[in-house]
Image (cartoon, grey):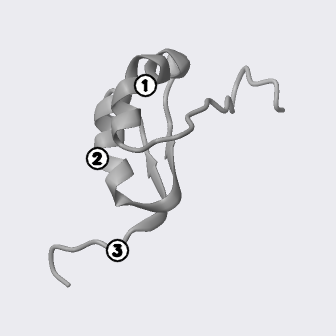
Amino acid sequence: MLGKITPVHVVTARAVAPLDRLAGWGVPLLRPYGEMLALKGDTAQEEIDGARSALSRLGVVEASVLQVGEGSSTR
């Protein structure tokens, strides 16, 4: 169907916008219990904290930071 997108399990996005705006674009594409993975920088937790009300309005029930890459303790 033209103009209708089937909801998906996972949406991924690079750090192209502040988290509240990025979530506004990505979260509506998700099916129930879907996950959005946003690649963000060192201030990811601060972005989550600042976007809590916007995330809540979008129906997001959990947001967390997973640190990977250089400087990560998960090597």
The secondary element bearing badge 3 is classed as loop
- Residue linked to disc 3: 6
Q: Which mark is residue 68?
A: none
The residue pinned by badge 1 equals 52
Q: For the residue carrying disc 2, how many other residues have a C-alpha within 10 Å: few (<14), some (14-19), or many (20+)?
A: few
Residue positioned 55% across, 34% down in the render: 63
Mark 3 vs 1, N-terminal side: 3
Q: Pointer 3: residues within 10 angstroms few (<14), some, or many (20+)? A: few
Q: Quadrant of residue 69?
A: top right
**Screen quadrant of the N terminus:** bottom left
Q: Position of residue 27 (x, y in %)?
A: 38, 49
2 or 1: tag closer to the N-terminus: 2
Disc assigned to residue 25: 2
- Please tell me whether mark 2 or mark 1 is closer to you in this view: 1
The quarter of the displayed image where residue 71 is located: top right
> Residue type at mark 1?
Arg
Q: Tell me the distance, in whole angstroms, between the alpha carbons under discs 3 and 1.
A: 26 Å
Rate crowding at label 1 as few (under 14), some (14 to 19) or many (20 or more) other CA atoms within 10 Å: some
Image position of 62 (left or right of 20): right
Mark toward the start of the polypeptide (3 vs 2): 3
Q: Disc 2 on helix, strand or loop?
A: helix
Residue drawn at point x = 82 percent, y = 31 percent: 74
**Percent x, y for residue 41?**
51, 23
Q: Which residue type does callout 3 highlight?
A: Thr
The C terminus, quarter of image: top right
